[in-house]
Image (cartoon, rainbow, N blue to C red):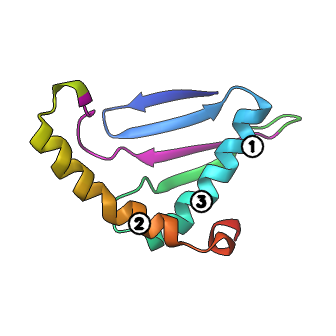
Amino acid sequence: MNIVFHVDGRFIFRFPRSERGAKLLAMDCGLLSCLSQELPILLSDPFVVGSLPGPREWPFKGYTRIPGRQLQWASLTTARRRTLARDLAKPLERLAALPSATAKR
């Protein structure tokens, strides 16, 4: 749905490839802004949001890459999986408790 460019190991730019992708990217930008204020985790905060010129004016965004490495679930021990589940529980509980009006805003 998106073309993603990783630039200099520090930045990520996303460009939609379809109308559906454009709608989801626009929604993503709004939700991330709202959720970053509500959740106790680091979320990507776009430093540039714009639209491509042309008849459709699809959105695009650029943001700073969150440092880290991809989780390799299959290589985790049972103890590490339990720790990870506990670490994820608090943000997920906060997310589930958000009023739908907050997300719609």
Percent x, y of residue 90: 32, 66
Do the residues bearing badges 3 and 2 touch, measured as CB atoms within 8 Å?
no
Three-letter amino acid code at the position of disc 1: Lys
Kindly state the secondary structure of the residue where label 1 is placed. helix
Q: Is residue 5 visible?
A: yes
Is residue 57 depicted above or below 29 in this figure? above
Front tag of 1 and 2:
2
Q: Tell me the quarter of the image containing the N terminus.
A: top right
The stretch of residues the image draws in magenta is 57-73
Q: Nearer the viewer, residue 74 or 28?
A: 74
* Residue bearing mark 1: 23
Q: Local crowd at mark 1 within 10 Å, few (<14), some, or many (≥20)?
A: few
Of the residues under marks 1 and 2, which one precedes in the sequence? 1
* Residue bearing mark 3: 31
| The magenta stretch spans residue 104 | no
Of the residues under marks 3 and 2, which one precedes in the sequence? 3
Q: Is residue 41 visible?
A: no
Q: Nearer the viewer, residue 89 or 28?
A: 89
Alpha carbon of mark 1 to alpha carbon of mark 2: how far? 27 Å
Is residue 72 depicted above or below 48 in this figure? above
The residue drawn where x is 39% and y is 40% is 11
Q: Local crowd at mark 3 within 10 Å, few (<14), some, or many (≥20)?
A: some
* Residue bearing mark 2: 93
The residue drawn where x is 67% and y is 52% is 27
